[in-house]
């Protein structure tokens, strides 16, 4: 396969169709633009969180609420899911049209399992926090925490739903041009979520636990 | 398995490996905190920023290459706007808090 | 907490008392009757529209040709229709407020404080989010693809989604007239006043969800326009060969993408406070209401540049065309536009100089605010130099441009005054500020939108608007603006506070009466526009410009028929200069029949946009009234529509080359048979849309 046919990094749209390449470039760039607008939302939630770190209103504090062990575990799970998605992307990019999509589906499934595990662990954390009296309406600090972190969690949930939809589409349509472009965008989304999590574990959990 | 495919797999593996190291180092710095508050915080943020760049480079294929140029310019522009908004917010709110004490 | 009865599960907090008619019946007062009347008018108007379409048997046509169309030209027209409808409502609200203030001097007047507060809240919210933003989206949707030689925007379905989210949000605004009440917190919705503790009703919730849907729509539109302009320009159209309207649209798109998210955050956090008891902006338990002002104006300032930049783009096009001269200082205009766009993110604190931060911070932002006046000044000079030694024709769009140049600059001066913190402290929250921003928005934004409307109407519909009624409307808009708002500068400096329903200083009376007369003139102006449209449609046989170039235009959009075919360009144009069509005409290389035609792929119609907009609006309504099942159904509906659409594979349709050839030949024959006219005859019936090339 010539370099020409893999013109857009990350996917291989096969032989002839120039329209597909052009569409892929537009679709990917457009999705980057959306991610940047999403990044602004997260950035402002981080700024708000930072400004409300001390607004504990006599209630639970960061050091008192956060558990380093579960934060570390969640980080490893999400980071690994980025790796499995990367493997899925490679699987999609280098597979022949005629090849069965089994490896791709397997890697997507692995990513999904890791993503859902992440959400499960996070929900478990939240339940624990509620039990200790650390719920969002207790203070400004907890409000800020329970806006930023669950928003990220909701994004992971949306990404997981998207993974399921893509797996269904690979099964139904195989890897046609549209499926490939959509998986490319899902990849951008998934890696972006891991980047936001880096910021969350640094600014929220680790900052909170520093003495 | 083609050479290209192998090299791409290696790229993801390297990115994953470096990220694991940076993550471990950040968590270790806090778990076994030996340095002062501000220093440790600085280390955590620096390691975090480094890992973000690793993700952009190894997972998102952002580089100085022609084909990634538009995406890179968009990211840099967004970074400027975000820096303006976040630093402005922090400066203003800290100033307001100081004046209310 | 109320009991969970069957009614509550089905209808949430809705009750008979939610209807303004019931409230007027129970507590009749002039204020309540007006509110009930407004609701009634909205319902009757909607019902009349449905009845009319049914009587004419046009539902199938409407559905197929308009509601499910992904053609940006059709989407654009629907946007502008929304804008004009909402303009009518918000203008009447403005007149009511002027009437109240003129009447209520040391007396209560006829509007209750609560009603007055709802009026200034809806007036501002509608004018910004549901008049100006849709109008701008409409102009950009229609003009930009044509000017860059493209057939469509980058993401046609997303375009439709944006339209219907905007429509749904506007619908929520209209529903608030009929069921419930609106926020009394102004268009900016400041907490803690808009928190549950002080505003327990549904008002702020209507505001939150209408604005949220609108802000998402705008973010997606900005995304669409940015990718379109960066990735879909015709071959040879480098960025520095783009028309100025495309440059301003590009910068507007960037602003939309980065400035709408802070608004989404501000309203979302307020919603979390109101719905889930969070403490972002409350008085107690660690809330910080000052962060709201910070977040809102991080959006709010770039927003006003989102509003003005497209208008600046229109003026560039109009002034150049009607001065029969190339735009002066193209490079400086593009640099100024880009500078304005970037600087707009550095001045937001000037909206809350008085909030308590140090004078160093205020000073820094004051300097930045003054700096941002400079590129605007550059543009004004460029437009003046464009007219200098040109052959200026005083058509309606040009008249608006001239009025803009004079009047907007006055408002700019008052802006420089306000940029200086110690002076701002004197006039903050007085009507001086109200005069300033209306002096920016009406001569700046509205005149630009109306100029664009008059300028491109013939292209969109194939016939010109009536020039005489256009001039009458223009006269009313200008006279009305001066009378309605210049007194407010005087009153503001005299200390009259804004947003007050009763006035206590009799010295203000003469000025308020003048302002009220101005408001009535503005109502006349709107009426004149309606009459103009009626007359124009009636006389359209005499003003047809099918050949497509009524004004001897310079950009590519004038090289197509009026109206253009749905595929716009039969063949993608090759661009070699800045005013490609003008140059082609001068080289006698315009209207050349291509050697062959190809099949053209267009997006197939889709109802997905409508479904998403409608279900999102229903979810919004459910959120306002705490109707749990409706919210869930709405959200599930949106997600399901997106997923279902992603499975669709047959999403294009082909226009066969033979049909393209037929359409193009019909137009080229009309061009060949048309009589070219000089500029002296461009507003007469002799103008068939073909320009006489003299130079």
Image (cartoon, coloured by chain):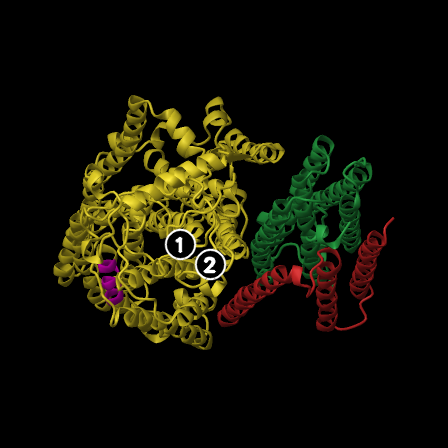
Q: Is residue C186 visible?
A: no
The quadrant of the rendering that contains the C terminus of chain A is bottom right
Q: Secondary structure at mark 1?
A: helix
Q: Which residues are magenta?
A: C398-407
The chain under label 2 reads C
Quickly name the residue at label 1. Answer: C556
Q: Which chain is green?
A: A
Residue at 27% across / 60% down in the picture? C443
Side (left or right) of C386 relative to C169: left
Task: Say which of C269 and B25 sits in front.
Answer: B25
Q: Residues within 10 Å of mark 2 (few under 14, many from 20)?
A: many
Q: Residue furthest right?
A: B1
Q: Which chain is yellow?
A: C
Q: Position of residue B97 (x, y in %)?
A: 52, 68
Q: Secondary structure at mark 2?
A: loop
Quickly name the residue at label 2. Answer: C575
Side (left or right) of A69 relative to B89: right
């Amino acid at each position: 396969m010539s370099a020409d046919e893999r013109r857009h990094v990350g996917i291989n749209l096969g032989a002839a169709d120039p329209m597909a390449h052009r569409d892929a470039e537009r679709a990917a760039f457009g999705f980057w633009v959306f991610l940047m607008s999403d990044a602004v939302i997260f950035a402002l939630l981080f700024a708000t969180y930072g400004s409300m770190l001390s607004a504990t209103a006599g209630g639970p504090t960061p050091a008192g609420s956060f558990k380093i062990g579960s934060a570390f575990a969640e980080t490893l799970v999400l980071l690994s899911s980025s790796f499995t998605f990367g493997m899925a992307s490679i699987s999609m990019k280098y597979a022949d049209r005629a090849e069965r999509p089994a490896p791709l589906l397997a890697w997507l499934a692995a990513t999904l399992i890791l993503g859902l595990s992440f959400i499960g662990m996070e929900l478990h954390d939240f339940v624990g926090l509620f039990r200790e009296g650390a719920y969002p309406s207790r203070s400004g600090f907890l409000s800020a925490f329970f806006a930023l972190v669950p928003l990220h969690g909701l994004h992971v949930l949306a990404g997981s739903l998207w993974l399921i939809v893509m797996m269904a589409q690979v099964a139904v349509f195989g890897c046609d041009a549209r499926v490939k472009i959509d998986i490319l965008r899902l990849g951008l989304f998934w890696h972006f979520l891991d980047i936001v999590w880096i910021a969350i574990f640094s600014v929220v959990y680790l900052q909170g636990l520093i003495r | 398995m083609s050479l290209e495919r192998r090299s791409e797999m290696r790229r993801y593996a390297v990115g994953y490996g470096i990220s694991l190291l940076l993550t471990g180092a950040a968590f270790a710095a806090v778990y076994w905190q030996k340095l002062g508050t501000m220093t440790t915080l600085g280390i955590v943020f620096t390691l975090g920023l480094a890992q973000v760049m690793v993700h952009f480079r190894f997972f998102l294929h952002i580089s100085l290459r022609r084909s990634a140029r538009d995406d890179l310019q968009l990211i840099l522009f967004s970074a400027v706007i975000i820096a303006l908004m976040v630093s402005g917010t922090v400066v203003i709110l800290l100033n307001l808090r100081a004046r209310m004490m | 907490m109320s009991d969970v009865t069957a009614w509550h599960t089905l209808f949430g907090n809705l009750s008979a008392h939610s209807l303004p008619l019931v409230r007027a019946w129970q507590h009749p007062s002039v204020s309540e009757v007006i509110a009930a009347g407004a609701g009634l008018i909205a319902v009757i108007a909607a019902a009349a529209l449905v009845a009319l379409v049914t009587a004419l048997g046009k539902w199938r046509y409407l559905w197929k040709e308009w509601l499910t169309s992904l053609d940006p030209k059709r989407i654009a027209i629907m946007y502008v229709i929304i804008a004009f409808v909402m303009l009518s409502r918000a203008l009447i609200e403005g007149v009511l407020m002027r009437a109240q203030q003129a009447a209520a001097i040391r007396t209560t007047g006829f509007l209750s404080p609560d009603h007055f507060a709802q009026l200034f809240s809806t007036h501002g919210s509608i004018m910004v989010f549901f008049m100006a933003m849709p109008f701008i989206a409409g102009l950009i949707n229609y003009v930009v693809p044509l000017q860059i030689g493209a057939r469509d925007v980058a993401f046609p379905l997303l375009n439709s989604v944006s339209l219907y989210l905007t429509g749904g949000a506007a619908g929520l605004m209209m529903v608030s007239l009929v069921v419930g009440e609106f926020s009394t917190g102004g268009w900016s919705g400041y907490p803690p006043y808009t928190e549950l503790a002080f505003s327990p009703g549904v008002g702020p919730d209507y505001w939150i969800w209408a604005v949220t849907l609108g802000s998402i729509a705008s973010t997606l539109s900005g995304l669409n326009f940015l990718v379109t302009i960066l990735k879909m320009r015709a071959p040879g159209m480098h960025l520095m060969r783009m028309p100025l309207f495309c440059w301003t649209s590009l910068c507007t798109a960037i602003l939309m993408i980065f400035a709408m998210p802070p608004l989404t955050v501000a309203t979302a956090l307020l919603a979390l406070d109101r719905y889930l008891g969070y403490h972002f902006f409350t008085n107690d338990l660690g809330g910080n209401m000052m962060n709201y002002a910070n977040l809102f104006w991080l959006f709010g300032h770039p927003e006003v540049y989102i509003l003005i930049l497209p208008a600046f783009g229109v003026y560039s096009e109009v002034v150049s065309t009607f001065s029969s001269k190339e735009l002066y200082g193209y490079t400086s205009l593009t640099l100024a536009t880009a500078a304005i766009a970037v600087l707009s993110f550095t001045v937001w604190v000037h909206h809350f100089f008085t909030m308590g931060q140090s004078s160093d911070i205020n000073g820094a932002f004051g300097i930045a605010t003054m700096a941002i006046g400079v590129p605007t000044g550059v543009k004004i000079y460029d437009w003046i130099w464009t007219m200098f030694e040109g052959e200026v024709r005083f058509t309606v769009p040009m008249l608006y441009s001239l009025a803009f140049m004079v009047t907007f600059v006055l408002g700019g001066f008052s802006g420089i005054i306000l940029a200086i913190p110690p002076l701002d402290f004197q006039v903050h929250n007085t009507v001086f500020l109200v005069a300033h921003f209306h002096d920016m928005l009406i001569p700046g934004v509205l005149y630009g939108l109306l100029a664009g409307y008059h300028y491109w109407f013939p292209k969109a519909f194939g016939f010109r608007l009536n020039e005489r009624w256009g001039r009458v409307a223009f006269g009313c808009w200008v006279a009305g603006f001066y009378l309605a708002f210049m007194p407010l500068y005087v009153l503001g400096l005299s200390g009259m506070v804004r947003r007050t329903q009763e006035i206590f200083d009799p010295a203000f009376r003469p000025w308020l009466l003048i302002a009220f007369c101005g408001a009535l003139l503005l109502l006349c102006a709107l009426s004149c526009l309606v009459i103009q449209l009626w007359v124009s449609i009636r006389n359209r046989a005499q003003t047809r410009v099918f050949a497509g170039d009524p004004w001897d235009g310079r950009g590519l959009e004038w090289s197509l028929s009026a109206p253009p075919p749905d595929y716009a360009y039969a063949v993608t144009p090759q661009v070699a200069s800045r005013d490609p069509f003008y140059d082609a005409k001068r080289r006698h290389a315009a209207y050349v029949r291509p050697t062959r035609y190809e099949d053209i792929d267009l997006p197939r119609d889709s109802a997905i946009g409508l479904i998403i907009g409608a279900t999102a609006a229903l979810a919004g309504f459910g959120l306002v009234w705490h109707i749990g099942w409706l919210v869930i159904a709405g959200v599930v509906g949106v997600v399901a529509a997106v997923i279902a659409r992603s499975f669709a594979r047959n999403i294009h349709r082909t226009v066969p080359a033979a049909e393209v050839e037929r359409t193009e030949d019909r137009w080229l024959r009309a061009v060949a048979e048309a009589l070219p006219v000089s500029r002296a005859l461009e507003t007469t019936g002799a103008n068939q849309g073909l320009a006489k090339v003299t130079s």
